[in-house]
């Protein structure tokens, strides 16, 4: 019964809330783990689950050496599921309402310095690679937003792109002159590739074969170019860098929130902590 209710919940999250496939699968994996734990006590009905079972499960996660961030994610999945079960009349009370998250220290993401970014731009790159790096840095895109970007969503004359983020939320992000020039140069090459290969695609970024670039290929490229400046970064590092550099140069937090597509400004506030830490590091490197 629990597995059946889990499937209905995942379907609801996808169709009604528009969550991305990756998010749905993450929910499914986390809740399947919880259900396996409940099965050890022969529990297969949501009405038989109480706060004791939830606390026991969290203790079990700690005993298995799960990180606080993992436990927090699993608790969020459980809370979401029980909220849905309560609203649908499957349970009379929600035992997860007062469930507390474990404390987790603030971990600041790694970012590139402006000097490192400029050095990367000086490296020899293909037109595709340069356009990819430019858009990641100029627009703060997630890698999935980049690979799913369609040609019709790019307006180089007005210098903005329209992308679809988490929860199928659409946002418009402006891009700078250099990024627009790099994308324009790549698009001329793209037209030639499609003409030569005979492929037709609505997506912006394609390989020489005419096929759309993958997330893994973007990861490999970003790792390669950042290693040249002594870092080993991912596309998300470039997104963090985009936001941090905006904050450091006086951008309003709410504006950065909109550009990143964050639903909650508290998520964006992380970048103010990064800026303060970098300022402190620079200060002590000067006076020491």
Image (tube, grey):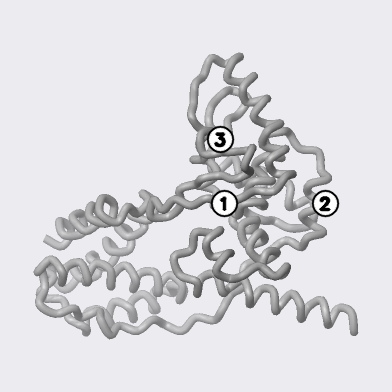
Q: CA distance from mark 1 to mark 2?
A: 25 Å
Residue 60: give x, y in percent of width and height. Answer: 33, 77
Can see residue 288?
no
Identify whether 45 is placed above or below 167.
Answer: below
Marks 3 and 2, how far apart at CA: 25 Å
- Pointer 2 residue: 119
* Residue 249 visible somewhere in the drawing: yes
Q: Is residue 200 left or right of residue 10?
A: right
Q: Quadrant of residue 110?
A: bottom right
**Residue under label 3:** 213
Return the disc, 3 or 2, that comes first in the chain's sequence.
2
Label 1 element class: strand
The quarter in which the C terminus is drawn is: bottom right
Residue 50 at what x, y percent from top left? Answer: 17, 81
Q: Is residue 182 left or right of residue 283?
A: left
- Secondary structure beneath disc 2? helix
Labels 3 and 2 touching (C-beta < 8 A): no
Kindly indicate whether the residue at mark 2 contacts the one at mark 1 (C-beta within 8 angstroms). no
Which residue ends up furthest to the front in the rendered image?
158
Residue 147 disc label? none
Circle nearer the viewer, 1 or 2: 1
Q: Which residue is mark 1?
A: 173
């Amino acid at each position: 019964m629990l597995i059946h209710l889990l499937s209905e919940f995942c379907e609801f999250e996808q169709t009604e809330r528009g969550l991305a496939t990756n998010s749905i699968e993450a929910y499914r994996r986390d809740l399947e783990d919880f259900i396996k734990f409940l099965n050890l006590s022969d529990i297969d009905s949501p009405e038989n689950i109480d706060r004791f079972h939830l606390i026991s499960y969290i203790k079990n996660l700690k005993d298995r050496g799960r990180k606080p961030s993992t436990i927090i994610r699993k608790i969020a999945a459980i809370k979401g599921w029980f909220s849905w079960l309560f609203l649908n009349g499957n349970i009379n009370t929600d035992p997860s309402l007062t469930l507390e998250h474990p404390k987790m220290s603030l971990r600041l993401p790694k970012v590139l310095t402006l000097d490192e970014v400029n050095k990367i731009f000086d490296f020899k790159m293909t037109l595709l690679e340069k356009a990819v790096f430019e858009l990641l840095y100029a627009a703060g895109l997630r890698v999935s937003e980049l690979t799913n970007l369609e040609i019709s969503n790019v307006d180089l004359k007005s210098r903005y792109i329209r992308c679809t983020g988490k929860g199928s939320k659409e946002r418009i992000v402006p891009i700078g002159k250099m990024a627009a020039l790099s994308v324009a140069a790549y698009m001329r090459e793209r037209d030639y590739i499609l003409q030569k290969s005979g492929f037709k695609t609505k997506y912006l970024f394609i390989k020489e074969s005419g096929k759309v670039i993958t997330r893994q290929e973007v990861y490999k490229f970003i790792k390669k170019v950042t290693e040249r400046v002594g870092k080993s970064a991912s596309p998300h590092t470039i997104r963090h860098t985009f936001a941090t550099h905006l904050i450091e140069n006086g951008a309003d937090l709410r504006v950065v929130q909109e550009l990143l597509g964050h639903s909650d400004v508290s998520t964006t506030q992380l970048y103010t902590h990064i800026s303060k830490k970098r300022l402190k590091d620079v200060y002590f490197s000067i006076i020491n």
